[in-house]
Image (spheres, rainbow, N blue to C red):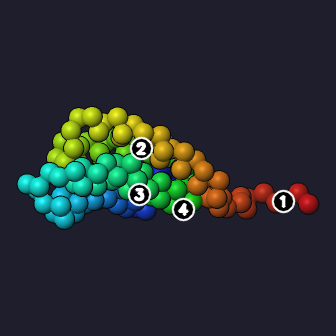
Amino acid sequence: MQRWKRRGTWVRFGGLFAGYLLLPALMTAAIGLGNASDSGMVAFILMLFIAFPLVTIALAAWDAVTEGFTVLWIVMPILFLIAPMFIFFNESALSYAATYSLIAMVANGIGSYFHHKPHNTNRPRLS
């Protein structure tokens, strides 16, 4: 079956998009929209440096362990950060999207080493 048709991969991409949207929304609701204090800015910076990379690493590695390596993790973090970037951040957050894409590819590559590949039963093993 082709990778594009598998539901598990798209569920993990949906989780990535939901994480990119829900984390800043919950942070905005907790801090308050009109209150732009220093602690609010620190919280958003920590989200960019800690929360988003951890979500990206976890989902990319999980996808690699269950489905194997895919190059979709190059494009998807960039695509999914565009909407939250214009809603919650500014255009300078696009450079972080490229970093998340690189982190996702590394995590997907490392996780693919733990992917179980079934052996081919069409030809017997040489013992």
Upstream in sequence: badge 3 or badge 4: 3
Upstream in sequence: badge 1 or badge 2: 2
- The residue mark sitting in front, 3 or 4, is 3
Q: Are marks 3 and 4 in contact (CB under 8 Å)?
A: no
Disc 3 marks which residue? 55
Q: Residue at x 39, y 48 (%)?
A: 49
Please name the amino acid that badge 4 sits on. Answer: Thr
CA–CA distance in space, label 1 to label 4: 25 Å
Q: Are marks 2 and 3 in contact (CB under 8 Å)?
A: no
Please name the amino acid that badge 1 sits on. Answer: Arg
Disc 4 marks which residue? 66
Where disc 4 sits, the SS reads helix
- The numbered dot on residue 125 is 1
CA–CA distance in space, label 2 to label 3: 10 Å
Quarter of the image for the C terminus: give it: bottom right
Q: Nearer the viewer, residue 38 or 56?
A: 38
In the picture as drawn, the residue positioned furthest to the front comes out as 38
Query: How far across and how far down the image is residue 63, in percent?
Result: 49, 57
Residue 14, visible in the rendered structure: no
Upstream in sequence: badge 3 or badge 1: 3
CA–CA distance in space, label 3 to label 1: 41 Å
Upstream in sequence: badge 2 or badge 3: 3
Query: How far across and how far down the image is residue 40, in percent?
Result: 22, 54
Upstream in sequence: badge 2 or badge 4: 4
Where disc 1 sits, the SS reads loop
- The numbered dot on residue 100 is 2
Q: Residue at x 54, y 45 (%)?
A: 106
Q: Nearer the viewer, residue 25 or 46?
A: 46
CA–CA distance in space, label 2 to label 4: 21 Å
